[in-house]
Amino acid sequence: MMKIRQHENLQKRNASADILKAMSIFAVVFIHGSFLIPVSQSRYDIDSESLRFLGHMLRFCVPVFIFLWAYFTEKSVLKSSEKTYYNRIYKLFIPFVFWSSVYFIILADLKNLNILTLISRHWVGYGWSGQYYFIILFQLILLFGFIRKLTLQILHYPYIIILISFCFFAIISYSNWFEIGIIGKLSYRPFIYWLPYAILGVIHAHKNIIKWSIPIIIAYISPVLILAEIYIFNPNLLNEYMLPSVFITTILLISTTASKLTYENLPPWIAVLVQTLSNSTLGIFCLNPLVIILFSPAFQRIEMSVKIPGISIFMSLISTILIMIICYIIIEIFKKIRLGKLISN
């Protein structure tokens, strides 16, 4: 009876946020591992540099995660009236320490290691692809009480906040900001760059501000705006996450969460896929660099010699899907042996 009720509740649940999380984790893995399977390109195919250019349009992934984190955290606070968000640090700290230790063992140059390089290269966001996300979240969680108080003071001015945020990212992207010494070295790790997404996430939890009635398909193809900005305006690409078009794309994608798309509106196999990916985002985030490291040597020896138009894009998608499947299998193994805390929070 419980399983039936849970199934019914899932069917009626809004699937929009889960679809967005699934899209974002796919984007993360594509950015990291789209070149896992090498191919021989035809003269009608795009080269690796062009493929990397296409990858720029997926930089909405982390901003979307930050926005949704702030949104659901604030919803939890409003529901329980307790400051439970501080407990998230402990739950995130376990996978952070474990996976950072794993990648340290695999990647560290022990011969040239000292205290400074130990900390700066392996424990503050540079140790492995994705570690920086933990660093950002730790900062935002510690400051969430302040962020809430600040946001409640400006709760009635959401569109002014959106305008100011757009200008903030435009100034950063079209200046030499990330070419300045320590600022460039810190890159996008400081919380200040993600504060607009956190503030808007909290506001959205109160007022559901981003609910424009635009066709969902327009929102889903909006990442092409990122490519258009790069191609037309040639911004500073030392930090693609800070592009104004990334901000606009994130807002447009978030607008889809206001739709009333439920799981019962989705084909069963898509509903299962969306729920599975949505529930496995942290595990895939932590595991995909390891899968790439372990499997790359084997695939590099076997270069696909099929030369047909579009083969590089097709194999990039196959690489991404393969990595995610392997990650999911490992996640299920961890759950079976009761190590779920290492791949979920």
Image (tube, grey):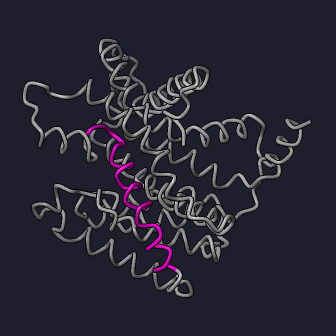
Is residue 237 shown in magenta? no
Q: In the image, what residue occupies the spot 57% across and 59% down? A: 84
Q: Is residue 93 above or below residue 252?
A: above
Span highlighted in magenta in the image = 127-151
Furthest-left residue in this view: 112
Q: Position of residue 105 (x, y in %)?
A: 26, 25
Q: Looking at the image, which residue is at 65% across and 73% down?
A: 208
- In the rendered image, the vertical position of residue 70 relative to residue 318, given as above or below: below
Q: Which residue is rendered at x = 31% and y = 43% of the image? A: 50
Is 132 included in the stretch rendered in magenta? yes
Left/right of residue 210 with respect to residue 104 in the rendered view: right
Closer to us: 232 or 340:
340
Q: Position of residue 255 (x, y in %)?
A: 60, 66
In the figure, is residue 23 to the left or right of 42? right
Question: Which one is nearer the viewer's eye here, 324 or 79?
Answer: 79
Q: Quadrant of the N terminus?
A: top right
Magenta residues, dominant SS class: helix
Count all numbered tags in the image, as a single digit: 0
Outermost residue to the right = 1
**Residue 110 appears at what percent x and percent y?**
13, 25
In the rendered image, the vertical position of residue 169 relative to residue 104, given as above or below: below
Q: Is residue 273 left or right of residue 46?
A: right
Locate the C terminus by quadrant.
top right
Quarter of the figure with residue 34: top left
Give x and y (percent) for residue 100: 33, 35
Tell whether 16 sits left or right of 88.
right
Q: Nearer the viewer, residue 95 or 324?
A: 95
Q: Residue at x 27, y 24 (%)?
A: 106
